[in-house]
């Protein structure tokens, strides 16, 4: 029941996000607005208790959710055949640039934080 | 034999087929991934996509037929993006103390990923719709589709680029971080996880989560930040050109 309530909250906030995004002409997609709304709603224990279960289930299986879109690659084989090598070069190199730059910048910014002395990433009150 | 063919024709045209095939193939791919000790090359998304695409091609099943069932899984991407607020909330104290630095790293990393993708695609002479579909590839597929649509790219292509980007990140991240000398202490895991969430969205985050719980949490944070920054800034920057 908790999981169902949590799922209902996610759908309600996503719908509210879609509505706000369209009505106000926001640059964010509906689910992103929904995420921001949920961040505010999580201060209420009622929402928190029910959303926790379903959020952990959904995020734990996040990679499954990309499979249907991924299979769509078969519909663009013509395009991929024609520009495939160049597109693959762009994707691989830019992903490495993104990963490397982010990791090095964040490590430099967090230098001297004393994180390695052992502080929990999850706040104790909600862990 | 004819009965079997008729049965196949019937089953393969109902939504039940796409949904069942996706789940069964993914569960098997996940089991295989676990057996290899979560080797990067055994990535379950990569093998599920390859197996399903090969299976559909071999049986002559059209993608829309498959998607009529698989859409029930695809639909969950929206609620999953909303659910990203949960890992952010869990780390709100750690976040509040380092808010500016996370935002800065997300901004610099996201700009490096999107900028190098669009710049390189343009330099290699790819058509403009492809360049614009490549720009949002670091954000999670549903958001990449929305952004691509806004700036004049092809949403379906943007989604595929995003999925491939996620797989590249999940497959090669470990080796890249090792080569760059990123440690595996608390700061190192934070940097690795945050980078995977920034440049390789949900698929990178899923990989980070499997390797180290903290890395997974920072990946979820990075993915959430990247979604907000990219959907705000990419359309703004695209307008300048």
Image (cartoon, coloured by chain):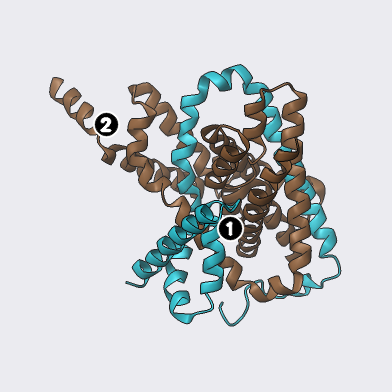
Identified at 33% across, 25% down, the residue is B61
Callout 1 secondary element: helix
Circles 1 and 2 on the same subunit: yes
Identified at 79% across, 45% down, the residue is B179
For disc 2, the chain is B
Chain B rendering hue: brown
For disc 1, the chain is B
Disc 2 target residue: B12
Disc 1 target residue: B209
Give the mark, 1 or 2, whose residue is nearer the N terminus: 2
Chain A rendering hue: cyan
- The picture quadrant where one finds residue B213 is bottom right
- Could you tell me residue A30's position as x and y percent? 51, 54
- Could you tell me residue B135's position as x and y percent? 67, 38
Image quarter of the C terminus of chain B? top right
Callout 2 secondary element: helix
């Amino acid at each position: 029941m908790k999981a169902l309530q949590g799922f209902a909250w996610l759908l309600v906030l996503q719908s509210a996000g879609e509505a706000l995004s369209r009505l106000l002409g926001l640059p964010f997609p509906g689910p992103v607005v929904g995420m921001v709304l949920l961040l505010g709603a999580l201060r209420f224990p009622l929402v928190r208790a029910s959303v926790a279960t379903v959020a952990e289930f959904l995020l734990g299986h996040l990679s499954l959710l990309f499979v249907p879109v991924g299979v769509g690659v078969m519909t663009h084989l013509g395009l991929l055949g024609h520009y495939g090598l160049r597109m693959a070069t762009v994707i691989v190199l830019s992903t490495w640039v993104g990963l490397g730059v982010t990791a090095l910048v964040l490590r430099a910014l967090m230098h001297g934080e004393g994180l390695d002395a052992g502080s929990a990433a999850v706040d104790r009150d909600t862990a | 034999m004819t009965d079997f063919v008729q049965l196949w024709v019937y089953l393969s045209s109902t939504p039940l087929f796409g949904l069942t095939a996706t789940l069964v193939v993914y569960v098997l791919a996940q089991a295989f991934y676990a057996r290899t000790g979560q080797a990067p090359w055994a990535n379950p998304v990569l093998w599920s996509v390859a197996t399903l695409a090969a299976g559909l091609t071999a049986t002559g099943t059209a993608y829309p037929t498959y998607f009529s069932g698989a859409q029930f899984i695809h639909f969950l991407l929206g609620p999953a993006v909303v659910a990203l607020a949960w890992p952010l909330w869990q780390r709100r104290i750690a976040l509040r103390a380092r808010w500016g630095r996370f935002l800065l790293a997300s901004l610099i990393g996201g700009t490096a990923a999107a900028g190098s993708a669009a710049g390189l695609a343009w330099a290699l002479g790819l058509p403009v719709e492809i360049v614009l579909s490549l720009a949002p590839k670091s954000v999670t597929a549903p958001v990449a589709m929305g952004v691509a649509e806004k700036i004049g790219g092809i949403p379906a292509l943007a989604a595929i680029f995003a999925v491939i980007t996620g797989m590249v990140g999940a497959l090669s991240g470990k080796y890249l971080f090792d080569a760059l000398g990123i440690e595996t202490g608390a700061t190192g895991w934070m940097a690795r996880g945050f980078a995977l969430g920034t440049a390789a969205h949900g698929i990178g985050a899923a990989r980070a989560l499997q390797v180290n719980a903290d890395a997974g949490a920072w990946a979820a944070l990075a993915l959430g930040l990247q979604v907000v920054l990219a959907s705000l800034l990419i359309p703004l920057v695209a307008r300048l050109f």
